[in-house]
Image: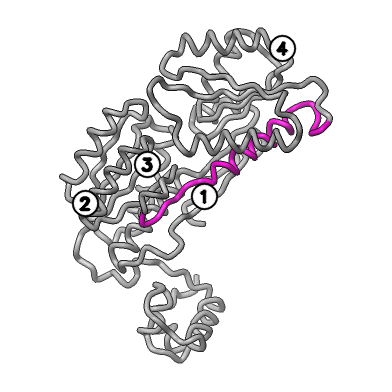
Amino acid sequence: MAKQLTITDIAKLAGVSAGTVDRILHRRGKVSERSRAAVEKVLAESGYRNNIHTSAVGLRKGFRIAVTMPASAEGGYWHSILEGISHATEEFSDISMEYSFFFYDRFDIYSCRTAYEGIPESRPDAVIIGPTFKEETLRLCSVLKEGKIPYIFVDSDVPEAGPAASFTADQKACGKLAGKMLCLLSAAPPPHHGKTEYAILCPEIPGMKPGPGYEARKSGIMEFFSHCGLSSLVHEISVPVLNTAESERIMTGFMASHPQVRCLATMDSRGHVAADILSRHGISGISLLSFDLTSENRKCLQDGSISAVISLHPELQGYDAVKAAIHCLLYNDCGKENSHRMPIDIIVAENLPYHRKIYTE
């Protein structure tokens, strides 16, 4: 393996000062275009990878990072974000980081308020937020902003909150992709669908407004079908996620009264729940699409009860959130383009064995 160049090595090869190289690598301060071109040429030829912590090896100060997001069992979507955070902590182990976790029930606004209230008391240097309740998130961000504490969003963004960075999927694009996948999973692509109809399962929680990410996802899927002239063939099924018996009754009743529905999509990660209901009631011949490659959805892909899963790489969101926090804390550099979009993957049974979690783009 070739020796990793140091900043001093790069400076000598480019004919500039080490300070100039440091400013280019960390995007701070002004440098001439001639110097920038010389340094970038050396970087490209050497295959240099800029580890943001290399200039902080001698750093002895530790940082306190608060993490708040919905609680999740192992193998769940939010747990994958935590795996990404853990991976980043190991990679940047020369920087001392102490974490405080404030988990909440994503269906309980009071649980969220309690978790958020404890964050300022932990005196964090930076906060990673998985927002579910918009108004509560805005209030927390107001307190953090007043204390000049940088905060980073994962999963969903609240643009008006002004985060230092956000790592989220383009939810409208996810919706459009879901619409296209449903068409591809049907007997024939548009516009030759025959009598095939489609349904989307929309989670409903009493007293809780849908999050901005969910609304964008739903808008995207309906926009796709409208563009194809198929809006009349799409049905929405509202299912109360906190009442499993009622959800099952609604779903089975709908399927019984709509025999032409052959393709079904869940607007969240509960594809495995829909697959279980279909199986137990002997409803076959349905192509099912879900979001998020959770452990349960992975099993359903393997046994064929789910046809495809759209993955948003939550582990990369967690990894990049820690990386952004380090940038802010070490260099006071949160970047000019602070809204980052995650890769969107389609996982089916055939490529599932080769799917790997990624931690760098």
Checking the image for residue 81, the label placed there is none
Q: In x, y percent, where is residue 330? A: 29, 66
Give the CA separation, mark 2 to mark 3. 16 Å
Mark 4 or mark 3: whose residue is earlier in sequence: 3
Q: Residues within 10 Å of mark 4 (few under 14, many from 20)?
A: few
Look at the image and give the residue range highlighted in magenta. 163-191
Counting residues from the N terminus, which is met first, the one under dot 1 or under dot 3? 3
The quadrant holding residue 137 is top left
Q: Give the SS element for disc 4.
A: loop
Mark 2 or mark 3: whose residue is earlier in sequence: 2
Kind of residue at badge 4: Pro
Image spot of residue 121 (x, y percent): 15, 45
Q: Which residue is mark 4?
A: 259
Asked if residue 282 lies left or right of residue 15, the reply is right
Q: Which residue is mark 2?
A: 124
Q: Residues within 10 Å of mark 1 (few under 14, many from 20)?
A: many
- Tell me where residue 284 appears, x and y as whole percent: 68, 14
Residue matched to label 3: 130
